[in-house]
Amino acid sequence: MEDIVVVQETGGMVYFLLITYAPGDSGNASGYVFRRPVGSDGPAENILATNDTLRELWCSPGGHVWTTSSTGLVWTSAPVAWSEDMPPDLEFDTPEGGVSWHHVALPTQEHNRARPNPMAIWGTSDDDVHVATFGGVLYHWNGRDWTQFYPGIGKPIGAIRGRAANDVYAAGYGSSLLHFDGDRWTRIADPDGPDANDVLTGIVFDEAGEVYVSGKSRGRVLRGSATQGFSVLGATTRPSSAWVGSMAGCSSPRRNRASSNGRRRA
């Protein structure tokens, strides 16, 4: 089985993350990162192949790729100074493109010493990267160190997006909605009260500065900001399964099959 799980565009290139796995065993998938020029129908380059369970991908404004795995690793093509400790069972290859990759394990979660499971990644630069996790811990890379914040909710945070280094939002289960002002994270109240218990799944912004957040389990769309608070813009009787968001300008990459050694085959 294989699935394309993330598509991102930057610098005239489309990057996409593909996973392959045995039927019913997606938790042990292998991960592959491909790229090709925007608008091209030619074969894509396989720039990373690994037995690590890659799940998320983000492209920085500097044109570098960041990807995370459910094992708690972060990978990047950015020129970072990481220790590069190699887990004993980790395998990876760079079949095409000549891209240099670095990887590091996120620090264990301070509140319970568990290994983090990243669910979302976003940033403003290679020195300002946020990672949200299944355990509800938010990590931040400042170009030198990883720091972490635990809001105490204990539920997955699966969406993170912002407009600037001091204006970042994160959303997830249990109506988790938080804002980062460049210094600290603050929780934002659900407009339907503390018992709303929605699954917030997507975050987008309009040109007027409004923030929109989608709720999956109750079919709601919230609108507002960290300073003004949020209200319910609308709701449907049928829960929405779609993420609010778009990747404007992205073409749909042709699916490329990848073999177990990480190389494409026709």
Image (cartoon, helix red, strand yellow):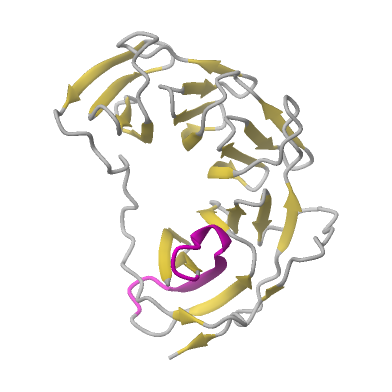
Quadrant of the image containing the N terminus? bottom left
Quarter where residue 106 is shown: top right
**Up/down of 197 relative to 47, above or below:** above
**Up/down of 15 relative to 147, above or below:** below
Side of 209 where 112 appears, left or right: right
Residue at image coords 81%, 53%: 82
Quarter where residue 225 is shown: top left
Can residue 63 be seen in this snapshot?
no
Is residue 98 highlighted in magenta?
A: no
Residue at image coords 59%, 40%: 131
Side of 191 where 107 appears, left or right: right
Quarter where residue 109 is shown: top right
Side of 222 where 157 appears, left or right: right
Instruction: Say which of 207 and 122 sits in front.
Output: 122
Residue sticking out furthest to the front: 24
Quadrant of the image containing the C terminus? bottom left
Is residue 25 highlighted in magenta?
A: yes
**Up/down of 194 relative to 216, above or below:** above
Residue at image coords 57%, 32%: 165
Residue sticking out furthest to the bottom: 266
Where is residue 53 drawn, in percent x and y?
Answer: 59, 60
Where is residue 103 drawn, in percent x and y?
Answer: 73, 58
Magenta extent: 22-40
Can residue 198 be seen in this snapshot?
yes
Where is residue 257 drawn, in percent x and y?
Answer: 44, 81
**Up/down of 163 relative to 27, above or below:** above
